Amino acid sequence: MALHLAIEDRDQGLSDEVWQPALVDVWNQLGPRERVLAIPPDFTRFPSQSGPITCLAHQHFGPALTDVMPALGTHVPMPDWQLERMFPSIPSELIRHHDWRNDVQTIGEVPSAFVKEATEGIFDQPWPAQLNKLVWKGGHDLILSIGQVVPHEVIGMANYNKNLFVGTGGVKGINESHFIGAAYGMERMMGRTDTPLRKILNEAQHRFCKHLPLLFVLTVITVDTQGQFVINGLYVGDDEECFERAAELSRQVNFTLLSERPEKMVVYLDPEEFHSTWLGNKAIYRTRMAIADGGQLVILAPGVKTFGEDPEIDRLIRQYGYRTSQEVLGLVEEHAELRDNLSAAAHLIHGSSENRFSVTYCPGGLSRDEVEGVGYKYGSYEEFAQRYPPGSLKEGDQVLPDGERIFFIKHPALGLWASRDRFEM
């Protein structure tokens, strides 16, 4: 168990000339491999720089890199244009699509007593550790789990073993993991590493995965003054230390703590990155600890044309809508179809303002009836983008020419925004 690499540049970011040879040196020290599996995130984590890292792995390992499986979780398979954009040098015949409903294996269960203690009694059932069959019994002598550490609504800080148990996990494990996070409370977890679900996943890894040749390659990302994504930290290891080191840097560079609570926040969702509210509601839960009670959140979402990534989850979102935590928990008790799709129930909680502030969604591909049908206010994208032009607004607090004060966010997936009185590091 070891941390093989930890390099950081909080201010300028790491150049390709720094991080690429450092990573290759780690791989060289591991020695030759015959069958390598790379598990990068999918296009929804494009800023993670996992694409260049995966391409570098292909360049280094050559024909020994036999499989590349994007960690889709519940997301739809990546279309060709996304694969070509994110992994330009990876041959299409190496790509494996994860099917979370069918192509998984339960490798063990974390005991209910452990789950109950970790969740402070909120959930008291054994948690099924599930992995894609290719991960579990693909015969690889190296498994590269690649991704970005950043604040996350389900587990506190994204990545590490979440990339495996959720990114390549199955229905029951994903459903229950999402529900545990939602029921425990996002605001108790986001930005923290020692969370209930993280304890459960760590236990699953320790119990069942010691024989797997895992190597975690983790990044911390910001945006520079030219609007380019840069790697501020790169960590490589096979245990929790690389994750903890990455999380510590992420807390320094990906968190924005505000002295005042903005009355109006405007968040832009890049159409290449966000096509559903399942993905786009980062605009809500990454700002919910910042926005003032009674305030307004405006979401500029030109690419959003659906609610769920999965057809069944999309149907459930349309049917039940985004409600307060207590309302959703009550619906779970009443309706078997929500109990059978706990990740959908969790998402309804994640997408709620808990009646503290209003949410005006301005999608490019959903109608007024659809948006209002799930509990949001509807805004015309053309109208709101004219008032709040995403290409010309600056990040952060600003006063518009007519005197209106707003707080603008262009990359909600890269951070967490909170008022100082609502969040303690």
Image: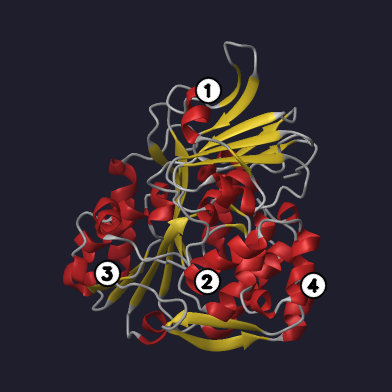
Residue neighbourhood size for the residue with mark 2, other residues' Cα within 10 Å, grouped as few (<14), some (14–19), many (≥20): few
Residue topped by disc 1: 387
**115 horizontally vs 340: left or right:** right
Q: Residue 115 at what x, y percent from top left?
A: 73, 78
Labelled disc at residue 95: 3
Q: Do the residues labelled 2 and 3 touch (CB within 8 Å)?
A: no
Residue topped by disc 4: 122
Q: Do the residues labelled 1 and 3 touch (CB within 8 Å)?
A: no
Residue neighbourhood size for the residue with mark 1, other residues' Cα within 10 Å, grouped as few (<14), some (14–19), many (≥20): few
Amino acid type at circle 1 is Arg
Task: Find residue 128 and report its image quarter.
Answer: bottom right
Q: Residue 192 at what x, y percent from top left?
A: 67, 54
Q: How far apart are marks 2 and 3 (CA)?
A: 25 Å
Mark 1 or 2 closer to N-term? 2
Mark 4 or 1 closer to N-term? 4
Residue beneath the point at 49% across and 48% down: 366
Residue beneath the point at 28% across and 42% down: 17
Q: Label 4's element?
A: loop
Q: Distance between the residues labelled 1 and 3?
A: 42 Å
Labelled disc at residue 312: 2
Mark 2 or 3 closer to N-term? 3
| Towards the viewer: 160 or 383 | 383
Amino acid type at circle 2 is Glu
Mark 3 or 4 closer to N-term? 3
**How many numbered marks, from 0 up?**
4
**Marks 1 and 3: which is nearer the front?**
1
Q: Which residue lies furthest to the front in this view?
A: 369
Is residue 4 at all visible to an observer of this figure?
no
